[in-house]
Amino acid sequence: MAQAVVIKSKSYGIHLVLNPEMEFQELLEAVILKFQDAGAFFKNAKVGISFEGYDLSVEQEYQLIDAIQEHTTISVICIMGEEKIQEACVLAEAEAHIRNRVMENAICHYGSLSPGETLKSDTGIVVIGNVPKGAKVIAAGNIIVFGALKGFAQAGLYDDSAAYIAALSIDTGHLQIGSILYIPKAKEGKEKTGLFRKKKTADPGITPQIARVLNGHVIMEPCTKDLL
C-alpha cells in the first residue's frame, strides 16, 4: 500500500509526495504525524515547499502549510511549482514577514477575485490570487496581493496615509491610500501610454511593487521586506 505522504529534501526545501487516493482530511492528519516525527530534522528551517501526486486547491495548499508550521518550528516561505516557482519566491522573505506580523491584523482571501467583485474589510487584506480589472479591494489597513493587481485598491480607508498597497505586479492607475489618489505619470502628459507599458524586451522577471504615501503623494516603487 502506498504511503500517505513522503518527504523529500530539495535544494529549495521540502517536496511532499502525496497519496492521491486519500481524502484530504486524512491526508492532512498524515502530514501532521509525518512532520511531528521528522520536524526535528528541519528545526527552525526556512524552506520552500512543493507538492506532487494530489490535485490540491490553493486553500488546501495553505491548510497543509499552516498544519506543518503549527506542529513544527519550520517556516514555509514560498510554494514551489512548475508555474509558480518564480512568482511564489520573489516575495519569499516578505511572505515570511507577513505571516509573522501582518496576518495578525488582516483577513486572508484565497483565490483570485472576479471582475465586478468587491472585497472590503475593517482590517488589512491579503489576497492569495489576482485582482483583475473591474474588481475592488478596500481595506482599513494594508493590502497585499500575491498575484497581479489590475483593479481598484484602496488602503487606509479611514484616512490612514501610513497604509500601503503591495503586489507581485501592479498594472492599474486606480489606487488610493487614505484620502490620497494615485496619479499615474502617464496622465500628466498628452500621451496616454498606460501606467506600466514598456517597450518589449527580454523578460527581466517579476518585480514586486508597493504603493505608499511620501510627501503627500502616492508613489510606486520596488517592494522589499524593509518597506513592509
Image: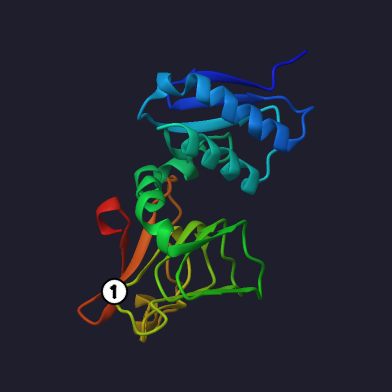
Q: Residue at x 31, y 70 (%)?
A: 212
Residue 157 location, quadrant: bottom left
Which quadrant does the N terminus fall into? top right
Q: Is residue 15 above or below residue 126?
A: above
- Nearest the camera: 202 or 117? 117
Q: Position of residue 13 (x, y in %)?
A: 45, 26
Residue found at the far top of this picture = 1
Residue 115 pos. (x, y %): 66, 71
From the viewer's side, name the closer residue of 202 and 114: 114
Question: Horizontal placement of 213 versus 107: left or right?
Answer: left
As shown in the figure, which amino acid type bears the numbered disc 1? Ala
In the rendered structure, the answer to whether residue 225 lies left or right of residue 21 reads left
Q: Position of residue 163 (x, y in %)?
A: 34, 72
Q: Quadrant of the C terminus?
A: bottom left
Residue 227 quadrant: bottom left
Frontmost residue, 56 versus 66: 66
Q: Is residue 189 in sight in this rendering?
A: no
Residue 68 seen anywhere in this rendered image of the structure = yes
Q: Residues within 10 Å of mark 1 (few under 14, many from 20)?
A: some
In the depicted structure, whether residue 212 falls above or below residue 31 = below
Q: Is residue 174 above or below residue 108?
A: below
> Which residue lies at the image location 71% right of the left edge and 37% below the top edge?
25
Q: Which x, y percent locates residue 165? A: 39, 67
Q: Secondary structure at mark 1?
A: loop
* Mark 1 lies on residue: 162
1 left or right of 140 in image: right
**Residue at image x 57%, y 56%?**
129
